[in-house]
Amino acid sequence: MIRIARAAGVAAVVLLMFPLSAMAGTRPPTSAPTSAPASVLANGTSYTPFGPTRIVDSRHKIGLNSNLTDGVAATFMVAGVSGIPAGVLAVSGNLTVTDQNHGGYVALTTDPTNAPTTSTLNIPMGEVRANGVLITLSATGYLSVTAVHMNCAVVFDVTGYFTKDNTQSSWYPLVPARLMDTRQGVGLVGKFVQSVPRTLQVSGFGGVPVGATAITGNLTTVNSTGSSYVSVTLNPTATPGTSTLNFPAGDIRANNVVAPLSDTGSISMTYMGSGTTDLVFDVTGYFIKDNNGALFVPMAPTRVMDSRVAQGGPGPITSGKPDTLALAGKNGIDSSVVAVAGNLTATDVTYGGWGYVVPKAAGTPPTSNLNVPKGDIRANGFVDVLAPDLSLGVGFQASLGSAQLVVDLTGYFVQASRPIGSAAFTAPASSTTTDAISSSGTVSWTTTGSVLSLAVTQYSAPISGTGCSSTWTVWSTTTEAGLSRGYTNYAPGYCYRYMISVNGDPSSTVVSGIARYPTAASKVPVLMYHRVSPTIDPGSQLPGLVVDPATFDAQMQALHDAGWSTITAADLANRMATHAFIQDKTFVITFDDGRDDGYVYAYPILKKYGFVATFYIITGRTGAAQNISWDQAADLAKNGMEIASHTTDHVDVTTVHGTALDTEIGASKTAIETNLASRGATVTVTTFCYPFGDVTTETENYLKAHGFIAAFTEVSGAVRPGIDLLQAPRVRVSRDEAPATLLTALALS
């Protein structure tokens, strides 16, 4: 399961696995940052991109003279090898394990140990697995690696190194952004094929500025038809000498990466297997050659959490009940820490789901660091910003069951010290008089001794005209010390005035400015389709609900050409519930009744225009003649579509009461989640469609109690802020509706 990330409060949260259902065909643009004064080096290290370069391959006696033997530590030199300078303190890289004779795990450590207390990568028999790491070297420039419960071969590729100076790159977190999704035509279009390198432009998109030297992020494979690997390289090559992500056919597999950028701000990727695969890449941060960002403090791998009771933990982590991991003053971590790097492992998994690491253990975050099926043990690296109290929330999310979670830290980031008075707007302009109108940007200021602070004033008047008025009513004002505040995170329809000053004194203002949100949607139409088919069943009582594929294609083309874009019903509900930004000219497409023509005729047309849709299926009819099959539903879910409930038997829910609602709604939700999970498409059903469009208070209360956040009626209209999302209206589309008429209907809804 991959879920999209949300914006954090003070600094962007670096989260490493996201939904495969991001908005199609779009990549967020980026403005170059305003330069800031040079900083004084804190107690961290700066980063230099390198390679990628293979320094260890035990199969070929590179770096190690033999494969690993169970319980015997092997040591290999890093500093001074293959162009890596002497004196480096830590490296970023990728560890790969293969040719194992048994299931087990491997620990990459600073110093040699035959009985490691941490782990880096868990692997069963018959697979090749990789994991991205930030790892500290020994005092003499070595790393050690130990296999436990198995003999195996290991491969290690270096992608960068950290040195104790202030001349190289510091790290900036980002709100996670999707830069590539080949299924949806984001970044690159079409599947990867064997040995054909492809280049993705990174700088200038997703918050990564021109001049960035490397990025942190997450690479995910989906829809792979062969077992193989993908290599991320600096420049395109059909024969890469390194690897980044290994995977079996048909699996959804992700890996945390640190990738150097080319001189033009791009990365290249090559798929080395038979068949094809789709790839998704989400950026979570970047390095740039200054020392105003965060600097890495290396530390020996240290286990800071193990939920297993035998290890002193709280016991299995169940869904919706994350554990809070307090790090303040522990394990030698400096009080100026802003983020940590490490490894999350899930074991004793009783039901397939996803593990996550977030700044605060509250609610269910729509993000994941680690996807794991029942019975497997999986690990993935992470870099995550901490909560203000220097804690992390560590949790597991699944429809049922629980998992044991283990967290090992390998280092942390501290904010570099800066002179008093260092502050800048990346956009809007640094001015006390000019109204700067911008769709993105960050307000940055020093954290030295909490001397400089930010005051944010939100005004409640709607945005109109050319600027913000200081006479508007102040809705709220906050003052805080910290690293940065991104103003794309705030609500549309309000204006924000920023002032950075010494200790909050307006008379000592360093920089101030005004920002306002881009055009936001005042409403979101939800189109209601039933069937897309060239034929109408003999004796059909509702022939007007059957739209010809050619008509449907013309309707979608008209919407596409007019600048409309889609989100799923669940995405709409989540954004409405959290007051998240929704761009103007956004709409939702729904299909009722779960007929197979939605897959056969509508789905290819949706893909043609980069649209996503929500398919409401009747689970008791799934697989029957003219109805969608579970395999088809799973394919839709894997390719960005939402599969949700239209009851078990298509009954009028106003006639169903008490425990019968479990049969019609609860069982339908469970059937979708269970059947799709067994086919490699892990979903959580959160929206519902009422058969015949009717609803009662009892039904609505049942939906609320069972995790549904939206349900759709047949009442005509568009979804607007403040409506009851469990009685959401839609716009019916008829068989012969002309594209121009449909566009008018959306405008008038």
Image: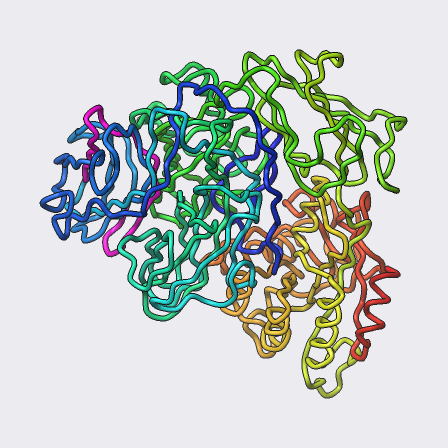
x%, y% of residue 683?
A: 54, 53
Which of 225 and 453 lies nearest the eye of the viewer? 453
x%, y% of residue 651?
A: 71, 64
Q: Is residue 679 visible?
A: no
x%, y% of residue 38?
A: 51, 24
The quarter of the picture where residue 562 lies is: bottom right
Colour theme: rainbow
The quarter of the picture where residue 247 lies is: bottom left
x%, y% of residue 473?
A: 88, 26
Q: Which residues are magenta?
A: 123-148
Q: Residue furthest left?
A: 65
Q: In the displayed structure, would residue 317 be above or below residue 677? A: above
Magenta stretch encompasses residue 147: yes
**What quarter of the picture does the C terminus occupy?**
bottom right
Residue at (43% x, 47% y) in the render: 261
Q: Please name the predominant secondary structure of the magenta segment in the image.
A: strand
In the image: residue 280, left or right of residue 35: left
In the image: residue 48, left or right of residue 560: left
Which of 557 and 51 lies nearest the eye of the viewer? 51
Q: Is residue 146 visible?
A: yes
Which of 229 and 326 lies nearest the eye of the viewer? 229
Residue at (33% x, 44% y) in the render: 131
